[in-house]
Amino acid sequence: MRRRQLNGKGQEMRRLRWAGMLATAIVLVVAGCSSDDSGGGSGGQAASCKGSVGVMGPFTGDAASIGKEQLNWAKFAVERFNTDNKTSYALVEGDTQLDPAQASTVAQQFLSNDAIKGVVGPAGSQEVEAVGPIYTRANLGFVSGSATKTTLTDGTRPTFFRVVPRDDVQGPTDATYMIDNLKVKKVMIIDDQTSYSTGLADATDQALKGGGVTTSRESVNQKQSDFSSLVSKVSADTDAVFLPWQLAAKAQVFSQQLSEQGKKAIIFGTDGLFSPSDFKADGSYVSSFAPDIKAIPASADLVSAYSTKYGEFGTFGPPTFAATQIVLTAMNEACKAGNLDRKSVVDKLKTTNISNSILGSDLKFNSSGDVEGAKFYIFKIQGGKYTLANQ
């Protein structure tokens, strides 16, 4: 009797030990599955981490050719990132029409969408100024692929970053090229009354004057479409007309009216005019905040894959791809650290480093939110083709 009782207790103890071992094994298996789910690709992420990235741009309106390219590259970036990292992040679109008021409306909508952990855009400097207070108060990070006004990173917008260089880099670059290569002596500068345009006009004006060039200033409303009276002010001895505009189609009209009046001045435009479908003035020059990635061997696969799905593109789309990639990487890193919220994403943006980016260089931000080592590229238009003119 006693022996049977002892055997019963022994069996009970063995059952408890087996139960404990089984429970431990289950925990290990579950942990192993979670680890597997978070792997894959480069820096893969657990499937349970979900979130959205908002993208702001002028998807309709006068600047739609630029905005659609930016949107397509943002979509492409999300598709590639999800495939490479086995994630399922989503994209939320916000059409700003390059209008600060509309951009503010989109920003409020993004703010109320808790799934959005980071934002790509907006496109224009005047829009960044409009949405800056909204995103700053909410500690929501936003990365622009095209806003270049120098003062945007003056510290008043601590959650703002950009993957393109600033106007105080572009202005001297453009002025130096005009002086050294085009041998200009007299330049007319015409801004389009936006903060982007006036800031860039000021920077270039200062650099040209510093190089001994005589300059004159004019201003035109961005909505204007007839420039004949303005063209009449271009004197016969004006070597170049500098157009820091955002709407390439408007510059094409200006160039046609310049030709109609027999004026020989060269048009030199800034990044907003880099649109082969809208601006084709032969002999003109355009500076851009990004290279033509078709000439970057390391980006060949991306160029081929994008072109197959979305078609031709200029220089506005690839920086948006880079901005989207950086936001998603920061979200992914925050998620892996166990805290995918907006503040954590901003913290990760400050330290994110994309090696060998689509733009042909590493992408990382300095303490102000500017990308390190960025430069401007100058293209000459011949027969509708944009050819790199500086190295």
Image (tube, grey):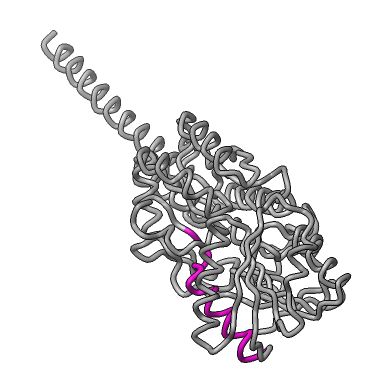
Above/below status of 324 relative to 12: below
Is residue 175 part of the magenta span, yes or no?
A: yes
* Magenta stretch, main secondary structure class: helix
Is residue 303 part of the magenta span, yes or no?
A: no
Quick one: quadrant of the C terminus?
A: bottom right
Image position of 250 (left or right of 163)? right
Q: Which of the 4 image quarters holds residue 305?
A: bottom right
Is residue 391 visible to us here? no
Residue 300 is situated, as x and y percent measured from the top left of the image, at 70, 69
Residue at 64%, 67% (x, y): give it: 190
Count of marks, rendered view? 0
Residue at 78%, 52% (x, y): give it: 309
Residue 63 is situated, as x and y percent measured from the top left of the image, at 70, 51
Q: Observer-nearest residue: 357 or 110?
A: 110
Residue at 15%, 12% (x, y): give it: 5
Residue at the left extreme, as displayed: 2
Is residue 212 visible to us here? yes
Residue 139 is situated, as x and y percent measured from the top left of the image, at 36, 42
Above/below status of 202 relative to 342: below
Quick one: quadrant of the N terminus?
A: top left
Residue at 40%, 35% (x, y): give it: 30
Image position of 382 (left or right of 368)? right
Q: Observer-nearest residue: 135 or 41?
A: 135
Above/below status of 243 relative to 317: below
Q: Which residues are magenta?
A: 162-181
Q: Observer-nearest residue: 15 or 277?
A: 277
